[in-house]
Amino acid sequence: MEFSHLSVMLPEVIAALEPERGGVYVDCTAGGGGHSLEIAKRLPEGSRLICLDQDDDALDACRVRLAGFMDRVTLVKSNFRDLDAALDLCGAEKLDGALWDLGVSSHQLDDGDRGFSYSKDAPLDMRMDRSASLTARNVVNTYSEAELARILRDWGEERFASRIARKICEIRENAPIETTTELAAAVSEAIPAGARQREAQNPARRTFQAVRIEVNGELSAIEPSLRAAAERMNPGGRLAVITFHSLEDRIVKDVFRSLSTGCTCPPEFPVCVCGKKPVLKLLSKKPETPGEEELKINPRSRSAKLRTAEKTED
């Protein structure tokens, strides 16, 4: 299947990162290479772009899309949680810009074999890195009722988490739940009819989000990656993060707030004794969101938020 992915908030990302300044940039979630291509086009001679992704399909697509810029591009198969190790492998000590486009890609949703979508019948998989051992089938069929309820509540913000977990366990007593269609049907059975009718979107979307996050460990990767990039960033370097749901955005917001906060001494102290200085400066207090034109072209961008920050002077 051809790797297709519309790059969300592309003009805003390029404006924030300013790759024309040159240096070393990293796209922590290269995907199909859309953002990477526009960064690479603008990098001056002698600059470098490192593209990370854990999905082999994404890296293959990047090789094709970025073929004309491989003199300045390095592709690395890596989860962005391992940013430090990936940069060490590439010999990149310092950074001048970093981008994260979090969540699942359009290609992963649209490829019926991957099992990410509740609207396509496929084996329960949901692995972004298909060499990983944990699959959605493992989660759905081996986690206890309590564990399922926890991830549905915590990762999916699902108010019917306990009912859905109970229904899943009832069904799998007779036979394992093998496909996306079977899981979506279990969710539909568990949610009261009135609540289903009031849903503007498929009620299974929160369950699929929760299972996907569990399979890929998505949320636990965000903070260490952001902190690693901030530590390596040259003064004036930029960080840009696109999130698609409140769980991701909350983590990014909290990390940025922590790194942009200076002295934490009690206000009654006459002088600072903690010595803490801000590492980042927020480029805007509120996140940017897609404009009306982008929403018309790419409805999947409707929940996107872009947060940006700049490394302070040492």
Image (spheres, rainbow, N blue to C red):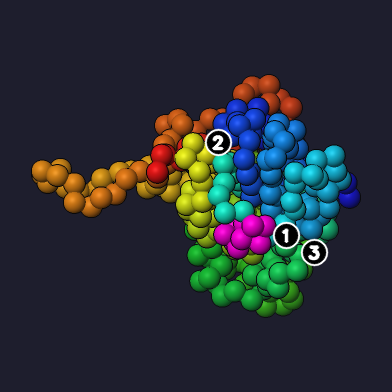
Mark 3 or 1: in front is 1
Where is residue 177 drawn, in percent x and y?
73, 69
Which residue is under mark 1?
77
Of residues 100 and 71, the one nearer the viewer is 71
Within 10 angstroms of label 2, few (less than 14), some, or many (20 or more) residues? many
Question: Would residue 251 be visible to someone looking at this image?
Answer: no
Residue at 55% across / 49% down in the picture? Answer: 94
Q: Quadrant of residue 57?
A: bottom right
Question: Would residue 313 be visible to someone looking at this image?
Answer: yes
Q: Quadrant of residue 176?
A: bottom right
Closer to the chain start, of discs 3 and 2, is 3
Mark 3 or 2: in front is 2
Q: State the extent of the magenta-drawn residues as a range.
A: 82-91
Where is residue 195 drawn, in percent x and y?
57, 46
Where is residue 286 drawn, in percent x and y?
45, 31
**What kind of secondary structure does the magenta stretch mostly adopt?**
helix
Drawn side of residue 314 relative to residue 270, left or right:
right
Closer to the chain start, of discs 2 and 1, is 1
Residue at 53% across / 70% down in the picture? Answer: 147
How far apart are the alpha carbons under marks 2 and 1?
A: 25 Å
**How many circles with numbers are drawn on the protein?**
3
Of residues 209 and 232, the one nearer the viewer is 232
Which residue is under mark 3?
123
Mark 2 secondary-structure assignment: strand
Task: Name the kind of residue labelled 2 in the image.
Answer: Leu
Which residue is under mark 2?
306
Task: Name the kind of residue labelled 3 in the image.
Answer: Pro
Mark 1 secondary-structure assignment: strand
Quarter of the figure that contains the C terminus? top left
